[in-house]
Every structure is written in structure tokens, then in C-alpha cells.
Image (cartoon, grey):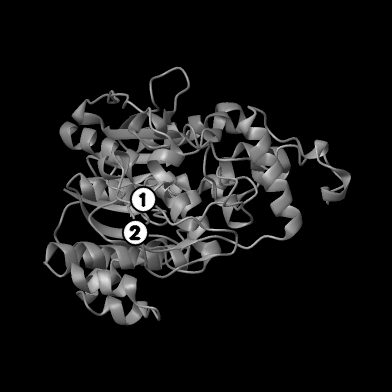
Amino acid sequence: MNFIDLFAGAGGLSEGFIRAGFNPVVHVEMNKDACDTIKTRTAYHWLKENGQSEIYYNYLKSFAKNKEEFWKKVPENLINSVINMEISEKTLHEIFKMIDKVLGDKEVDIIIGGPPCQAYSLVGRARDPHKMKNDPRNFLYKYYVKFLEKYRPKMFVFENVPGILSAKNGVHLDNIFKAIRKAGYELSVPTNKYKTLNAKNFGVLQDRKRVIIIGWRKELKLSYPEFNVAENNFEVLKDLFSDLIPLNNGKGTLNAVSYAKPATYYLEKAKIRNGLDFVTQHIARPNNENDLEIYRIAVDEWNKGKRLNYADLPPRLIKHNNTKSFTNRFQVVNGQGISHTVVAHIAMDGHYYIHPDKEQNRSITVREAARIQSFPDDYFFEGSRSAAFQQIGNAVPPLMAEKIAEKIRGML
């Protein structure tokens, strides 16, 4: 079954669908680093299917990675199926032409993806409601509808943040529903009280609520699927981080390093550890002494069952005059449970993602953030450390995506 991934990001949603047996025909994404990540992952899947995984693993282990040279190891049409363009009125016709060329006489069974979520985020709207109101990203759904009209997939999956439910007091969601119904589709948000799905119920060690709109051609007469709640009594420190080499701030490497310990049951169950004897991108960002002292205090408070209030810090550590806005600026990842939501802001600084082990005294690494999002350890994020963090924060957890994809496969 073939799918197109729109606003594909780093490919988390796509990864889940591939695991469930779907075939990606095209990815469309405007961010170059995210596109490069998908190209590298696309090459990985082809090499794996053709018994040449060692070429990919050698790329991961190489110190001077040349992605363009690596991509030449797979058919050119696969790399070209990742379209690095912004979806807009200006580009739509050209994107359609590129997709048609890749598609040939194949049918599209499903379209997945969701417009960038910042336009609907509650945080962004609280910060500047007028800017958000006029944000052109609010209307990207109209292009999504055009893809539905042109390719007529049997189903689609539209992922977004909970803020989409309340944008313009619900009017925005109504407009999306009307436009999609007019295109010949029926659709629904999750049928539970909160109208969201939470990644923690799919086995991801993260409290991450998302609106997953699922739609189908009207003649199929389907309904929103029921998802089983996965048992999730695992812990971040013990089950997710314990096999990684302990690091202090600013230490680590983008390159391949060995694991400190064997895989835990959870890491194998969640397909995070998948047979490799090395891991990449286990690198912590550097911090100044001021931040590191705050991190130590934050972990101490967390271990007492409290959350650090920025205004309660010793005056010498407070660097922002507006202490009210920065009340929750520093947060510790829950080592004895599941993490709070990983968002793209992690690319700016790690203050909201402090490692729970005080001895390491740092924010989490790229690989730790990727694991919280359930990305497998052999998933490589192209670009700088900040670019990798941003891609991870914006992604759909692959483990959650896989469970959704399996359910949809059963419906088709």
C-alpha cells in the first residue's frame, strides 16, 4: 500500500507506516536538514531490503560523513522522491508534477502528515495572539485538501497539536472539516473526552498529546478506530537511558560509540535497540557554570518531589528580570516515570530537559531525546546538533505511528 507524506519533518510518522508494511512513494518537506534526514533513512530502508545494511552502518561509523556520496549507493529515483519544497500556491503545480513523475501508474492508498504545528500551538498563541491569527501556516490545510482532491487516497491521517481544537474558538477546526468533507471525505478526531491520542498509551515513554484526525472516502463508510492502551510501567532512567555511556555537559560525540550496558527489555520491545553494537549522536550541549548550578538545584528539588521555581533561586543565579515569565524555565525529565513532552524548543536550550542523574549534571543528549520520542538508535538526524533537536521535537513518535498504521492497514 502506497502513501505520500506531506509536511514530513524528520519522518517519524513515515517510519511507523513503513514498519507496518506501507510503501512511501513521496515525502514533501520544506526544511533541508529534515529532508536530508529522510533521504538518509530512505537509503537505509533500501539497503536493508537488499541485504546491504553494512553500507549504512559504515556511514554511521565514518568520522567525516559525506551524505551525498552515501546517497549514491542507492537508486537515484529514491533520493529524488524526497521533495525539499515549501507547499504553497506558487509551488503546488510543480510539486504535483514531481509526484506524478515518481508515482507513474501507481495509486496512492493513503496520505499522511500534518501542517507545521506552531501555527496552532497554545504557547505561541498566548505569546502573540495577533501574529498567530495572521500566520499563513493556519491555512496550509487548504493545500492538504488539494492533495486529497488530486490523488483520491482511500484514507488520510492528519496529525497536529491539541491547540488546533481551540484555534479561533473551534472555528478553525470546523473550517478544516468542511473543506475536507466538500472534497468527498468523512473524518473524525479521536472519540475520547479530550479528542486527543497520547503517545504514552502507545508504549512511548513520554506524555505527548496529539490530535490525530483520520479520514476516509465517504463511500468506504468507515469509523474512527479504537486503540488499545499499552501497558506502560517503564521508567526513563532504568529502562530508556541506563545502557548509554554517562556524560557530563559538553561531552559526547556525533560519531559512533559503544553502549555501556546490554539492552533493557523495554529498548528491545520498543525497537529502539535493534542489534547494533554502537550508537551515534550521544552528545550533550555545553553549559556555563551558572546553568549547571541551577541544574543541580533543580534535580535536588525534583528528588524531593518539588519543581524548581525560577524566582526562588539565589539572587546571584537569576539572570532574567521577568521572573514570572520564567517560573518553569527549568524542568527535570522524570527519571522514575515517563518524560514530559519533547518540543522543538529543545533546539534553543536544554533547560526544560535536565537529565535526572545529578552526577551527569547536564541537559539530555540528541540520542536521549530521540529515544524519548521512540526513534530507533540507527535513525540518524542530519544537520547540526540544534537541527537534530528541532527535528526530534517536531516529530511523531515512530512507535505511536506504527500502532496507528497497523490499525489503518486492518481497515483497508
**Label pair 2/1, CB-CB below 8 angstroms:** yes
* Residue plotted at (28% across, 66% down): 81
Percent x, y for residue 209? Answer: 47, 32
What amino acid is labelled 2 in the image? Tyr
* Residue plotted at (23% across, 26% down): 222
Residue 163 in the image: above or below residue 43 = above
Residue 153, by quadrant, is top left
* Residue plotted at (38% across, 44% down): 397
Give the class, few, some or many, for how many residues have Cα within 10 Å of label 1's Cα (few <14, many ≥20): many
Q: Could you tell me which quadrant the C terminus lies in?
A: top left
User: Is residue 94 or residue 231 the one in the foreground?
Assistant: 231
Percent x, y for residue 101? Answer: 23, 68
The answer to whether residue 246 shows anywhere in this view is: yes
Percent x, y for residue 402? Answer: 27, 41
Q: Check disc 2 and report the residue beneath it.
A: 379
Disc 2, SS:
loop
Q: CA distance from mark 2 to mark 1?
A: 7 Å
Percent x, y for residue 339? Answer: 50, 37
* Residue plotted at (34% across, 32% down): 202
User: Is residue 218 or residue 378 the one in the foreground?
Assistant: 378
What amino acid is labelled 1 in the image? Phe
Give the class, few, some or many, for how many residues have Cα within 10 Å of label 2's Cα (few <14, many ≥20): many
In the figure, is residue 37 to the left or right of 342? left
In the figure, is residue 131 to the left or right of 57? right
Q: Check disc 1 and report the residue beneath it.
A: 375
Disc 1, SS:
loop
Q: Residue furthest top?
A: 193
